Image (cartoon, rainbow, N blue to C red):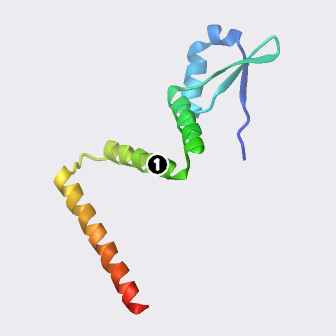
Amino acid sequence: MPSIPHIRPVSELRNKFSEISRQVHETNEPVYLTKNGRGDMVVMSMEAYEQDRANQRFVNQGLDEWEVYLKLKEAEIEAESTTKRYSHEEVMASMEKIIAEAENRQKKSKKKI
């Protein structure tokens, strides 16, 4: 269910800047500012803006790149949550093992046919 948009008069940007800043960072949702009762501006956190831009790029470029982006984001989150780091050699050895296992499964499935 879509959330209800946060709409405020543009004068609050000057008078309640800290409150609006806190709101956009806590909710990760934009705040729509009105001037004379009409939409005038949108304020959002930098993180929400970058995510929105990334979403637009990947919608335009296709799903494969979106999947790569998601995997990179997942890796960033994992890196932030642990102190374990892998060397280039460890990563390459792991990838070679995964590829070899996939090739062996593929060969076995071809023999059954």
Q: Residues within 10 Å of mark 1 (few under 14, many from 20)?
A: few
Name the foreground residue: 42 vs 102: 102
Quadrant the C terminus occupies: bottom left
At label 1, which amino acid type do we have? Answer: Leu
Q: Which residue sits furthest bottom?
A: 112
Examine the image and state in which quarter residue 19 appears: top right
- Residue drawn at x 20%, y 61% is 93
Residue sitting at x 59%, y 38% = 56
Residue 91: name its quadrant: bottom left
Q: Is residue 2 left or right of residue 108?
A: right
* Residue name at image x 46 percent, y 48 percent: 70
Q: Give x and y (percent) for residue 101.
A: 29, 74
Residue 89 in the image: state x and y as whole percent: 17, 54
* Residue for badge 1: 70
Residue 47 is left or right of residue 2, and the answer is left
Question: Is 50 drawn above or below residue 13 in the view shown?
Answer: below
Q: Up-down: is 75 above or below 26? A: below
- Tell me residue 48's x, y (percent): 55, 32
Q: Is residue 61 left or right of residue 103?
A: right
Numbered label tally: 1
Helix, strand or loop at mark 1? helix
Q: Is 40 above or below relative to 50?
A: above
Residue 56 left/right relative to 64: right
In percent of width and height, residue 63 lies at: 54, 51
Q: Tell me: residue 46, above or below residue 94.
A: above
